[in-house]
Image (cartoon, rainbow, N blue to C red):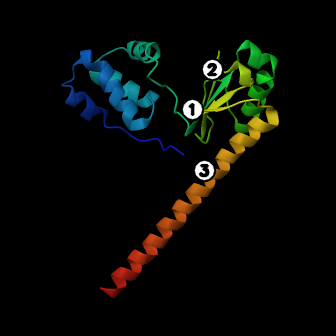
Amino acid sequence: MAEEQTVDIAGIVDRYEGDPGMLIPMMQDVQAACGYLPQTELKELSNRLAVPLARIYSVATFYASFRLMPKGDHTIQLCMGTVCFLKGADKISQAIQEEFQLVPGGTSPDRRFTFSPVNCVGACALAPVMVVDGHYHGNLDVDGAIRLLGEIVQRDEAAREAQRKAAEKAAKKKKRGSKKS
């Protein structure tokens, strides 16, 4: 799960010598640090540069590389093209939204998934198709889509638990080592 970070906006502005013409690189630095462009950081950037907040949001919404919302650990693209739609993509979309608290174009509250219904993924023969982290999953139904995403959740939780246990083990080993000294 991604954690929200605080960013040294003053440091970013100073790095570019406070030049409002360097707004885009400054915004890129903020996004690199936070994973997206948080409203509080954009307001501070606006104040420090004396650039209207509306201009900053105009830039942020013009360029597709900028995100105003945090991105999830996993991206879900669900094809909503004609063939996929006729084969039940709308029902899959509704089920995903309900099961994982998602809205189209949004990220789940736990920041695990970002959901993007798309017009076409070019795999009509596999309809309905969902692309998760760049991997195509075709001939899905509601149960299959929910099961697939549930497996991802289980893998994530198992990996986090393994990391937690490894960190505990390392801490115990370090503690034992410092007692011997």
Tell me the quarter of the picture where residue 41 sits: top left
Q: Which residue is found at the position 21% from the left and 30% from the top?
A: 14
Q: What residue does disc 3 label?
A: 156
- The C terminus - image quarter: bottom left
Q: Which residue is found at the position 74% from the left and 12% from the top?
A: 82
Q: Which residue is found at the position 66% from the left and 47% from the top?
A: 153
Q: Which residue is found at the position 81% from the left and 37% from the top?
A: 143
Q: Is 86 in front, or is 165? A: 86
Callout 2: helix, strand or loop? loop
Tell me the quarter of the picture where residue 109 sits: top right
> Relative to 124, is 75 on the left or the right?
left
Q: Is 77 in front, or is 40? A: 77
Number of marks in the rendered image = 3
Disc on the earlier residue, 2 or 3:
2
**Which kind of residue does numbered mark 1 sit on?**
Gly
Q: What residue does disc 1 label?
A: 134
Instruction: Count neighbours of disc 2 (C-alpha within 10 A) and say few if under 14, some if 14 to 19, many if 20 or more.
Output: some
Find residue 10 and report its horizontal and vertical position in percent: 27, 33
Find residue 50 and report its horizontal and vertical position in percent: 29, 17
Which residue reaches farthest bottom? 180
Q: What residue does disc 2 label?
A: 121
Task: Report, in whole angstroms, how far the alpha carbon at label 2 lies from the one at label 1.
Answer: 11 Å
Task: Report, in whole angstroms, how far the alpha carbon at label 2 lies from the one at label 3.
Answer: 26 Å
Which residue reaches farthest left? 17
Above or below — where is 96 with respect to 25? below
Foreground: disc 2 or disc 3: 2
Instruction: Count neighbours of disc 1 (C-alpha within 10 A) and say few if under 14, some if 14 to 19, many if 20 or more.
Output: few
> Relative to 16, is 128 on the left or the right?
right
Task: Report, in whole angstroms, how far the alpha carbon at label 3 lies from the one at label 1.
Answer: 17 Å
Find residue 32 and report its horizontal and vertical position in percent: 38, 34
Callout 3: helix, strand or loop? helix
> Relative to 66, is 92 on the left or the right?
right
